[in-house]
Image (cartoon, coloured by chain):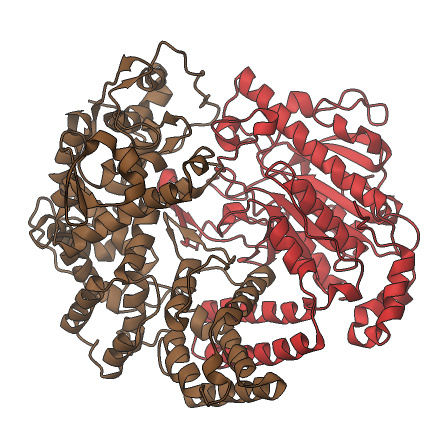
Amino acid sequence: MLALGCVGSLDAGPRAPGDAPTCVIGETGAPVPMRRLTAEQVVRSVHDALGLARDGALTVTDERVFTYRSNISSSIDLSGARGYLDFAESTSARVDVSRCASTACLDWLLDDVGMRLFRRPLDGGEHARYAALFDDGQSAGGGEEGARWVIQALLQSPTFLYLDEVADADGTLDDYSVAARLSLTLWGAGPDQALLATAARGELSSAAQVRAEASRMLDDPRSAGGLTDFVDQWLQLQRLDDPSARPDLAALGTETVAALRSEPPLFVRGVVLGGGDLRELLTATETPTLAPLAAIYADDIVGSRGDLTQLDPDRRAGLLTLPGVQAALAHAGTTSPTLRGFEVLSGFLCTPPDPPPAGVSTTLAPPTPDETTRQRLERHFSSPSCASCHRGMDGIGFSFESFDWLGRSRSEEGGRPIDDAGEFQLGTADVTVDGPIDLADRMADTRQVSRCIARQWTQYATGVPPTGEAACLLDAMATDLRSEAGLREMILQQVSSDWFRRRQETP
Amino acid sequence: MRSRALTRRNFLGALGLAGGAAALFPWLAQRASAGGAPKRLVLFYTPHGTVWDRWRPTGGETDFAFSPILSPMSHHRDRVVIMDGVRIESGTDYYIPHTYTMPLLWTGSPIDATSATLFCREDHGNRCFGWNTGTSVDQFIASRLPATTPYGTIELGIGNGGLHPATRMIYSAPAAPKSPLDGPSTAWSTLFGSVMTDGDALRRRSVLDTVREDFAHRRASLSSRDRERLDAHATSLEELERALVPASAICDRPSMPTFDAETAMDRQLDLLVASLGCGLTNIASFQLSIGDNDGNLYPWVGITTGGHHTMSHDSGPDAQTALAGLYTWYAQRFAYLLDRLAATPDVDGTTLLDNTLVIWGSELGRAWDHDISNVPFVFAGGAGVGLRGGRYVQAPDTQLNRVLVTAMNAMGITDVGSYGSLDRGSGPIPGLLT
């Protein structure tokens, strides 16, 4: 029996055992305070509504709640207000407002751009206010100037920057509020005109209607936005662009780093659209083709099918073995079985280990030429206080030792053969696996993994950690994920649930 | 390099040149008529404590010898007080290291660990907490002094990360963190980058008026907590309008800084000094990195793997030696700040350092065991704020809140003997000020 006293569990509520949950999904909504859009959501929304190329000019920071960005508690200070001002001004300078030079364009500004940014039609007061602002700008510098003034105000308005949710007495959100939640979750951006029209017709009122609309939205190319926000945070892919975490990666060139970071969300989107289940997510050997990754995959590529690359099933299996994931969970020039194991424990089993106890030396002696990374890390195990957690983390992480710090396959390290056997606890069972393919196979059969992924998605989608009241929803989502309908059904189950569609007053 | 200093002559020149500037920018007139130089305050933060046996001076109160870490500031000996013995108390039953003391450092009030469940730590038994329950002392002082500058306070930093209690030390109110202007590019463009024309002023006023009406319209339908957040945002817009002035009306604009990872902090400190010298504010803070697991590398002092936070947990001799090298680098930066303040003339012919109190603190005393019973502090400044420099003060178990009251007293607020909800009272650090 391995000592795993350090491992916590994120599950707060009751849980039905086995694969046949008997509990009934509740009718309460998640307790979500007023949310301010994340920087990514702002930039994407503006890009969509104004037809601009994306750039990263917004410097306002986001809150981290658990693993996911969610602005539910803080207020905007002077530097934040300045960040929005600068973004609004630089954006308005890039918009093509030539249509406003000679003809009236208020319809476009308010009923198209404004409605999309506010995620609902402007009310009478707003219409009058913004029309007056346009007139002031037009007097100062013509119609184009008027348009820029209006755009600058729209982009700094609280109605754009904060979710403006309307609920009835029992907490059910109105159709526009549901549309906004759906689009920010699934697209990572505000709604389009079609979605707003659906809301206007009152067709987002029932679970079935929401499910149908969400299904359309997943098929839309824009779902790449929401799935990127989810996968990127879930798998800590921001480490790939963090020079303090990976000072070595910039040398690969921006195209390669961008491909490393974008492949995992594209892969997950492929599983969603292809109707894949947990096993597909964790073991598929076809992945979207990204040219800059060919050199990293090297001999692991065995063929292609359409725009998919086929990978050697003895070397690669599913999401966790993508080079971007393995590279993100490594250090410069060396792998990190600890980071890789932590991600599995935290992101796939929802049992993150505690931090090192105080005063324990966490710096291993430098590597020597006659040992592998694995042998070096196994020194953790000689200290009981380190071993209690590191056996669990590193024991999983060792299974990935056949991938180097860039996610390339390797069979040796410094002339020594790689040992990628892993030994750890999965659920309540002691497990020994023979490398990453075997690990993925085991995880694909583990209910705890499907439930943890359901939990990750739910936290991402609502912006707050699920409480015990969502336990039965998570169970049902976990069952969906392992059923034929798979990941897509898990997402649809969640966004059509009361947990997503209703609001619970927050304290 | 062109001098960024505001000389008395070109300050007056700017006033004369601007003609009606005094009417447009009342703080200029106030400043000119007030005569004497204002008192100023700078809070300076570096993460993760120190290495005590290389930080602690030897000798007595006045005949001390600088330690290896603090020796870079030895040429400012008469302007510094090294304070050994400041104790931080978390004020909570359970203490999450870094996270609970970072927001406590300048507020003297505990984190909300009882009622709030906004932030949860998976790695601390899923324990949840909220923001700090107090206001930081710089913000309180600014609220008590007449508003004579475009900015009440200015917060600058390097590598300050996303919004989280462990990453923010300045609070304008309970649960209202202020984010530093992160990095010299953002700081320069915000403070000095905009050259505003009359047309810009008209446009911004019209745009922000419209936005403000949206705020008023929106707040009616919100819960009280959400309304507080929205109101704070609206207040920030008002502050923003006040700060949007042509920098050219105030002083020589520093040119846009160029920097790399190693020099970014010095360039940020240049901007901090320029903000004080130009009269943009009298109260500023600087925050290096975050009070959290930062992973920062400092290759120029030999920290090339692992990151500062991870290394700081290591009590072994090799790690402690490497950390002492990093803390010495911090002291060099602190000394650089004092150099710049000493080189910048004030309006009355003295220097900024004469009229400024600089306080250097950290969220921990000793990182490897997260000790907070003795946290290293250094005070620096001159006669204008009454600092009795040239001393090494050993005063074990001095409550952190004494530091905060000292800051208030130095800034002329002497009617308050305690600060922060954890304060058990008894005024400033004895004998620190004249």
Q: Nearer the viewer, residue A465 or A338?
A: A338
Image quarter of the C terminus of chain A: bottom left
Chain rendered brown = A
Give the residue furthest to the top: A370
| Relative height, residue B272 to residue A204 (above, below) | above
| Relative height, residue A312 to residue A73 (above, below) | above
Q: Colour of chain B?
A: red
Asked whether residue B420 appears in the rendered view, the answer is: no
Residue at x-position 55% and y-position 79%: A149
Image quarter of the N terminus of chain A: top left
Where residue A489 appears, as percent x and y from the top left, is 14, 58
Asked whether residue A382 appears in the rendered view, the answer is: yes
Quarter residue B13 falls in: bottom right
Q: Nearer the viewer, residue B275 or A471?
A: B275
Q: Is A351 on the left-hand or right-hand side of B150?
A: left
Q: Nearer the viewer, residue A409 or B81?
A: A409
Quarter residue A452 falls in: top left
Residue at x-position 26% and y-position 24%: A410
Residue at x-position 50% and y-position 31%: B307
| Relative height, residue B175 to residue A117 (above, below) | above
Where residue B264 appears, as percent x and y from the top left, is 63, 42
Where residue A274 appears, as percent x and y from the top left, is 13, 54
Count numbered badges in the picture.
Answer: 0
Q: Nearer the viewer, residue A477 or B347?
A: B347
Q: Is A242 on the left-hand or right-hand side of A198?
A: right
Where residue A2 appears, as percent x and y from the top left, is 23, 23
Residue at x-position 25% and y-position 18%: A418
Quarter residue B359 falls in: top right
